[in-house]
Image (cartoon, grey):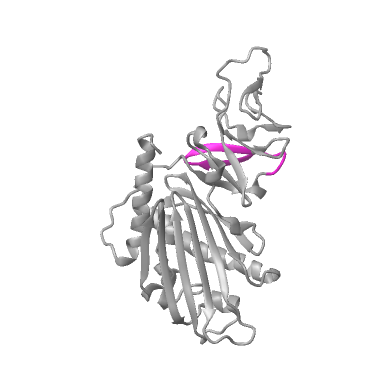
């Protein structure tokens, strides 16, 4: 079900605060995060090996975690360092730890073979903190399988119907698109020529609903849950004060359980960088847009039930991107399950 030998987002760096324990379920495993004295993030399995009490309910003392049930204490390497009432520490008294990397204002975790956890493999989302870019970020908990979120982002024709008040327009559903698979990535490209801008882009480009723009969506998907969409509009006949819009919609999806997902997102831009109002507009309007996605995805999951690979009764051309994405993901999981990934 899961691709494990890869880096996946566990949290924003601001969520893991010094002196506090931060729990989160990932790939249906309970994890607890905290910061060691040197500031690095440590990830433990959130389960004391003694009586399986959640360590996240315990106490962080310096860089050791004390279980709230019987007081067993664990160092940042996961080894038990103290047991009340006895000196001998059993050899099996240790907590599973996970490789962690902080990059791009995100905490990334490796849930697979720790020997393969190469930090160089962290997916590129440099727009989150690069000079010349400003990102408005957020998080949604979605009660739906992560593959449904991938499908949603690889078929943006739904914008016309689900997001009619923000980013949707008839041209999104009606315009042909191209798709391809290269290596471990799927690409979906759509160019919408001489169309009217929806409300979202009217504000960003400083144009009116009757103005004409060229609009684009260039999507790249890397399994299991990395999707970055190069989006924007170019006014055809720029009016005074109007501007080209270049953005990156960053979508990082980490499975929580078979029927729920962590959705970390951001809209990064390279225009109107000093305007705080633009950042807040993006944060609020992207959140509203993804609220609409969340409502639809959770409704889908309720209809589907616990089945993670439902058989589609009908397929249409717009399914090409999601289909390619699922095939690539399945092939990578198969390779990993054979021990060669």
Side of 18 relative to 1 (left or right): right
Residue 208, picture quadrant: bottom right
Asked if residue 246 is positioned above or below residue 139 in the image, the reply reads below
Q: Nearer the viewer, residue 291 or 77?
A: 77
Residue 28 in the image, given as x and y percentages of width and height: 47, 40
Residue at figure coordinates x 73%, y 35% from the top left? 37
Residue 158 in the image, given as x and y percentages of width and height: 41, 68
Q: Which residues are magenta?
A: 17-33
Residue at figure coordinates x 41%, y 60% from the top left? 187
In magenta segment, residue 255: no
Asked if residue 175 is positioned above or below residue 1 in the image, the reply reads below
Q: Quadrant of the C terminus?
A: top left
Whether residue 306 appears in this view of the structure is no
Residue at figure coordinates x 33%, y 51% from the top left? 327
Side of 236 relative to 173 (left or right): right
Residue at figure coordinates x 57%, y 74% from the top left? 245
Side of 114 relative to 341 (left or right): right
Residue 234 in the image, given as x and y percentages of width and height: 53, 78
Residue 249 in the image, given as x and y percentages of width and height: 53, 63
Residue 77, picture quadrant: top right
How many numbered discs sit on the rendered protein?
Answer: 0
Q: Quadrant of the N terminus?
A: top left
Q: Nearer the viewer, residue 299 or 271?
A: 271
In magenta segment, residue 22: yes
């Amino acid at each position: 079900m899961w691709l494990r030998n890869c880096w996946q987002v566990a949290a924003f760096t601001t969520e893991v605060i010094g002196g506090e324990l931060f729990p989160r379920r990932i790939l249906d495993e309970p994890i607890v995060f905290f910061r060691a004295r040197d500031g690095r993030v440590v990830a433990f399995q959130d389960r004391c090996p003694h009586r399986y009490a959640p360590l996240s309910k315990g106490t962080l003392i310096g860089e050791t975690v004390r279980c709230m049930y019987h007081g067993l204490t664990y160092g940042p390497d996961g080894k038990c360092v103290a047991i009340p009432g006895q000196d001998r520490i059993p050899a099996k008294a240790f907590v599973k730890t996970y490789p962690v990397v902080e990059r791009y204002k995100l905490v990334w975790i490796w849930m697979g073979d720790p020997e393969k956890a190469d930090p160089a493999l962290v997916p590129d989302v440099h727009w989150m903190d690069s000079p010349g870019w400003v990102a408005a970020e957020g998080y949604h908990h979605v009660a739906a399988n992560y593959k449904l979120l991938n499908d949603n982002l690889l078929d943006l024709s739904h914008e016309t119907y689900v997001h009619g008040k923000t980013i949707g327009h008839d041209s999104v559903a009606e315009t042909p698109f191209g798709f391809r698979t290269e290596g471990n990535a799927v690409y979906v490209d759509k160019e919408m020529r001489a169309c009217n801008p929806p409300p979202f882009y009217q504000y960003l480009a400083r144009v009116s609903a009757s103005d004409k723009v060229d609009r684009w969506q260039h999507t790249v998907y890397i399994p299991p849950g990395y999707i970055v969409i190069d989006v924007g509009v170019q006014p055809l006949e720029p009016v005074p004060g109007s501007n080209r819009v270049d953005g990156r919609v960053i979508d990082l999806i980490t499975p929580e359980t078979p029927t729920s997902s962590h959705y970390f997102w951001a809209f990064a831009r390279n225009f109107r960088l000093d305007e705080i109002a633009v950042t807040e507009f993006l944060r609020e309007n992207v959140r509203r847009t993804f609220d609409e996605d969340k409502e639809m995805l959770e409704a889908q999951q309720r209809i589907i039930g616990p089945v993670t690979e439902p058989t589609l009764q009908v397929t249409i051309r717009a399914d090409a991107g999601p289909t390619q994405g699922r095939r690539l993901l399945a092939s990578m999981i198969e390779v990993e399950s054979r021990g060669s990934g």
